[in-house]
Image (spheres, rainbow, N blue to C red):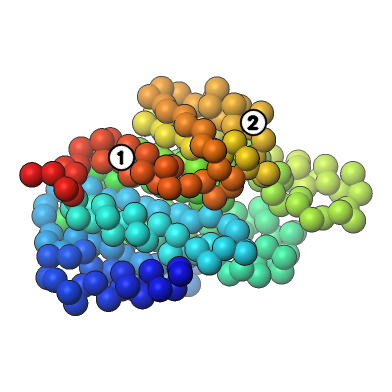
Amino acid sequence: MQRFLLALLLSLPALSAAEPIIRDVVFPGAKGKSIPAYLVIPGTRVNGGAAILFVHWLESRSPDSNRSQFLSQAFDLARDGVTSLLPATLWSDPKWFEQRDPEQDYDKSLEQVADLGKALDYLLAQPGVDPNRVAYVGHDFGMMYGLLLSQTDKRPCAWALQAGTTAFEDWYLLGRRTLSEADKQKVRDRLQPLAPLRFIGNLDRPVFLQFGVRDPYVPRARTEALWNAAREPKKLVYYEAGHGLNEEAIRDRVAWLREVLGLKRADSD
């Protein structure tokens, strides 16, 4: 179904010149490597248009655990004049988590944050984009690395964040059953400077947090810690859903983005 939807969306530009256009692009990362991404642009360009950087989740069993996750939402918002970039990440490869070198988690995390900065560079260089109307949307690792990005990159004016946790070791220690408690503590100590909980309170832009009440990876104590640390203006909604959230969460997110970016609804007169 995911492949069918992707093929359908990619074919839509041929149907009407006014329809949004999806381009398969590459941009230079922080270390010169080429990073693939989907660039979604309005069918009719307008100056002063909003922009969104969408960063996907990690769920190796899901067909949308890659840059296609937010594609339908980006397409919908392009009808309102939004230009979006959906880049590949470290975790786009479904085998990445199990095959990665844990000793490189810290350094690779810093490199990923730098790559997200390059993604914003590329997005904001697109014709017609207003640099004061750019939002960041991130799910799971996309949320957590976004919070790291927020410490050095103040360009996003709004942050829609879903199903992330307070510390990277919560996930980077998953499955590492053979580690001694002393070695686990070394991992915690190494990754602690990157803990998203340390940074969310520094955001002085609108923040929308979304979590599932049946999420096996993000317990309620973690979500409440993030909420309590966040500054106003902020919004939090829980959904009857797991880690992937649900259609209600998508509708709420798109509506919030339309409001905070000052968009005219696609179906309005």
In the rendered structure, which amino acid carries the disc numbered 1?
Ala
Q: Can residue 34 be seen in this snapshot?
A: no
Q: Are marks 2 and 1 in contact (CB under 8 Å)?
A: no
The reply, left or right, for residue 157 in relation to residue 228 is left
The reply, left or right, for residue 121 in relation to residue 148 is left
What residue did someone put label 1 on?
A: 255
The reply, left or right, for residue 83 in relation to residue 117 is left
Placement of 35 over or under 134, stated as above or below:
below
- Image quarter where the C terminus lies is top left
Residue 224: where, in percent of width, then height? 59, 26
Residue at 90% across, 44% down: 181
Residue 119: where, in percent of width, then height? 39, 59
Q: Can residue 69 be seen in this snapshot?
A: yes
Residue at 38% across, 70% down: 6
What residue did someone put label 2 on?
A: 220
Q: Which mark is residue 127?
A: none
Q: Which of marks 1 and 2 precedes in the sequence?
A: 2
Residue at 75% across, 59% down: 103
- Alpha-carbon distance for marks 2 and 1? 25 Å
In the rendered structure, which amino acid carries the disc numbered 2?
Arg
